[in-house]
Image (cartoon, rainbow, N blue to C red):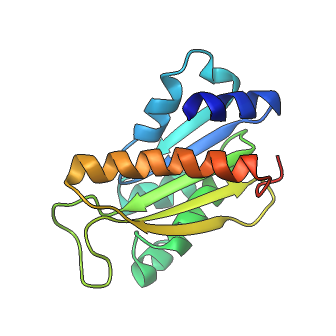
């Protein structure tokens, strides 16, 4: 899956940037495990705290206060900020509740929001619910983000 994503990005001379919260840089780690990833991976932002989301990516603290860090509007701002602060063509952002605590009836543990965005385009937003412990939720979120980005790129949803 990662090799296919790498090949597609390389073929189109495109680069990706990640903005991660609950996955703590796992997606960037998985991407950079591939030799030659500097051809298609620009950088990764690990913005675990609300302040980091604001300071590094320009996410409005008021927006976080109003919607919560785990929301589609926040991950949309995360991809916007990641693209503004990188040379990448595409961005993906992840914010979620990995657990075991932190959930609520509206956003239970395992709730993860994703944004996928091409530079100068509107983001594509998705919320998923994963089961398992903290490690399993984080791993599932990372794998989902890579698979979804590959699917979007393959189906030209992101104009590659």
**Looking at the image, which residue is at 34% across and 45% down?**
139
Residue furthest to the left:
100
Residue 53 screen position, x and y as percent: 46, 58
- Position of 3 compared to 155: left or right? left
Query: Is 131 on the left-hand or right-hand side of 59?
Result: left
Which quarter of the figure is the N terminus placed in?
top right
Is residue 28 placed above or below 110 in the rendered structure? Answer: above
Residue 5 visible in the snapshot: yes
Q: In the image, what residue occupies the spot 54% across and 21% down?
A: 34
Does residue 143 appear left or right of residue 84 in this picture?
Answer: left
**Looking at the picture, how far across and down is residue 158, in whole percent?**
77, 55
Q: Nearer the viewer, residue 9 or 15?
A: 9
User: Relative to residue 37, is residue 83 depicted above or below?
Assistant: below
Asked where in the image residue 110 lies, by quadrant, the reply is bottom left
Q: Is residue 84 visible?
A: no
Quadrant of res 25: top left
Q: Is residue 100 above or below residue 73?
A: above
Snapshot quadrant of residue 36? top right
Image location (x, y in percent) of residue 28:
49, 35
Identity of the residue drawn at 75% across and 44% down: 89
Horizontal relation, residue 49 to residue 101: left or right: right
> Looking at the picture, does residue 94 appear above or below residue 72?
above
Residue at coordinates 40% horizontally, 53% vertically from top-left? 21
């Amino acid at each position: 899956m990662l090799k296919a994503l790498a090949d597609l990005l390389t073929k189109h001379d495109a680069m990706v940037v990640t903005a991660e919260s609950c996955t703590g840089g796992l997606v960037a780690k998985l991407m950079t495990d591939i030799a030659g990833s500097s051809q298609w991976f620009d950088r990764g932002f690990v913005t675990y705290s609300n302040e980091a989301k604001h300071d590094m990516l320009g996410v409005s603290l008021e927006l976080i206060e109003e919607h919560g860090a785990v929301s589609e509007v926040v991950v949309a701002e995360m991809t916007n900020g990641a693209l503004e602060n990188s040379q990448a063509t595409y961005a993906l952002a992840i914010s979620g509740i990995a657990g075991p605590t932190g959930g609520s009836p509206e956003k239970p543990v395992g709730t993860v929001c994703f944004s996928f965005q091409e530079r100068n385009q509107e983001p594509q937003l998705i919320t998923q619910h994963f089961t398992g412990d903290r490690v399993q939720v984080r791993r599932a979120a990372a794998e989902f983000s890579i698979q979804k980005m590959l699917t979007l790129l393959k189906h030209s949803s992101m104009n590659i």
